[in-house]
Amino acid sequence: MTVISSTIEGRIAIVTADNPPVNALSQAVREGLVREVQAMAADDAVDAIVIACAGRTFFAGADITEFGKPPMNPSLPDVVETIEATEKPVVAALHGTALGGGLEVALSCHYRVALKSAKVGLPEVMLGILPGAGGTQRFPRIAGVENALDAIVSGRHISVVEAHKWGAVDQLVEDADQLLPAAIKLATEKVSEGPRRTGDISIDSGKYDPAFFNAFRASVAKKTRGYFAPEQCIKAVEAAVNMPLAEGLKAERRLFMECMGNPQSAALRHMFFAERQVSRIPGITKETPRRDIKKVGIIGAGTMGGGIAMNFANAGIEVMMLELQQDALDRGLKVVRGNYERSVKSGRLTMGQVDELMARFTGTLSYDALSDCDLIIEAVFEKMEIKKQVFAELDRVAKKGAILASNTSYLDIDEIAASTSRPEDVIGLHFFSPANVMRLLEIVRAEKTADDVLATAVDLAKKIKKVGVVAGVCHGFIGNRMLSKYGWVSAISVISGNKPEEVDAALFDFGMPMGPLTMADMAGLDIGYMNRQSIGRDNYDTRAFDWQDKLVEAGRKGLKVGAGIYDYDEGSRAPKPSAFTENIIDEESKRLGITRTPKAAGDIVERAILALVNEGAKILAEGKAYRASDIDVVYANGYGFPPFRGGPMHYADSLGLDAVVKKLHGFIKEDSNWGTVAPLIEKLAAEGKTFADFDRENAA
Ligand code: CAA
């Protein structure tokens, strides 16, 4: 199959790529582009060239599947050089998403026509690299240094309407069928003028001194913490400002190769594909029927219920919120409106749009009002008896075929399902707080959940812009089951010698958005306390948690009361080390006969992350997660695990599972409460394999 072909209309050659699904710039595409552009440039019957793509999009970038493999000629820089050097005008016809290498190809063309709905962008930074085919040199020249710097460092997708204002797109067309004719027309008009090369544009370097770049660095420092590629991107744009094109391109290549050699690039690539794997579910195909979801009922108008409801309203779906008392309902709807109004202040919504969104909400105090909902999600108090009562009501009022979902974070969905007469319609939809913001949705497949219910939930996750990961029924599913081990390790690290702020700093420096003890304060220490009270002292490691229980008993329930593991100034969320807590820790360690010996930051991190990995491997072996990469997606999107480390399972692979096994045995020797090394890790390590190998071998 030829992925690149040419036709000639009048005296204009149209070079068309057809490499589904996204016209990635694979070796065959690159080779074809060079071949056809050179042939058309040499053809006397041709005055100008249009480059266009068939299918859903202009080139969406380099072929990411080729990364990490030996390079194949021609390289992308060869392609863009060939195009830019052509002596006949070359026009790019953009539709869909011209991203990364795709935009670089477009920038090497002499003119650009775009369908108004198209987007452009240089998202390489999200893959841990930088635009390596001249994007960092040409985009600042044509779009302006400020615009290009922001685009390259954020990686965001940019509407061509915006790019047109910057001068990076010459002409916009409204309808898809106008695109090619407009590109041909522009090419014809430019024959007499000849090529206009982006690389020839000069930049007024005097305007962009080191202070300009340092101010930019400071403005993105918080967002880019821990990432390698953003600084490389900034350096490349500095090169564009301070060097002639040829030298700038050399600097870009060097910075690009440094990114490629950094482990973050492999980790971020892993995350890219991992997020696209999650919707591949054994037993579910395109042919599996789906149920129609037009109206969603939400039980509980608290923070969680309100946040969940917003996702559906945002996606244009009607929502019915149920509460037991009118004032709770009014309060819940007011909070939702308040959240939307905050977006008006930040300029993301208009008041008109808020009214439109709020019109999708209806409130009720009666279960009977849920009878026409296609999906009902309960977000009530986390207690089995209460959940069962709610599901009994739902069983009574819900129409036939309605999906009944629980937002429980821990409880047994099989047991909940068994309390209805229709367990096949029951599923877990576990949202993460704040539910209107966090991207993760754990979709819990219970034993009797029907395939069409699961397929509908997976599609719905995409529709409401979540990344939906399917989990099996077990206490805490994927995320919280692993988190309990992480919480235990951090509590043990404190009682055995480190200060809470040392444990938090170690994990913050590893890349977590906050340390586990700050997180515990935010969630509320009383939640763990009540949980421990209910399971009884014989069923958990009391040494790890007694110091936290003492804090709760002293009224220090966490951030919400202004005191927990840390102190908080009135109205502040910033944790401050607490002398009271330090004292409790001292007393408790003495009572337990522990000689407190602080560990180095690296040792703290190793224990915390390998506790996640060990439990993750058990979850995987039990089939409660389909892939190790699904676990990575859960941790990156629900718990802030730094994407540049690729999630806990990828991180373990990067350490080598042999080394992981040795470490885990060492920890168990130190403290038997670590339990056992997951047999799956032992097995993979013995075979010299990784979690990635496990995923490949078990691919559905
Ligand atoms: N290379 C290889 N495969 C790619 C790809 C790429 N650049 N982009 C997307 N795909 C694949 C996806 O893996 C997916 O495959 P499966 O169907 O087998 O899972 C398929 O194409 C469709 O992708 P999506 O499901 O993501 O489709 P979408 O419509 O939701 O999104 C998109 C389309 C916006 C183009 C999105 O896929 C995307 O953002 N792609 C990545 C774009 C990118 O980062 N480009 C820069 C690459 S690096 C580069 O170009 C620089 C360089 O100089 C080396």
Image (cartoon, rainbow, N blue to C red):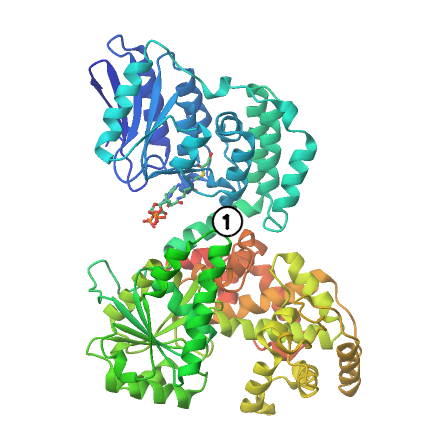
Answer yes or no: is residue 471 visible: yes
Task: Find residue 553 and report its horizontal and vertical position in percent.
Answer: 68, 88
Name the image quarter holding residue 279: bottom left
Q: Considering the image in quadrants, where does the N terminus appear?
A: top left
The quarter of the picture showing ligand 1: top left
In the depicted structure, whether residue 565 falls above or below residue 635: below
Q: Is residue 441 left or right of residue 551?
A: left
Q: Residue at the location (65% across, 35% down)?
A: 213
Image quarter in which the C terminus is found: bottom left
* Relative horizontal placement of residue 364, taking residue 397 as reference (left or right): right
SS at circle 1 = helix
Residue lying at 57% horizontally and 22% vertically, measured from the top left: 203
The relative height of residue 375 versus residue 693 in the rendered view (above or below) is: below
Q: Quadrant of residue 577?
A: bottom right
Q: What residue is shown with label 1?
A: 268
- Residue 324 image position (x, y, % from top left): 39, 85
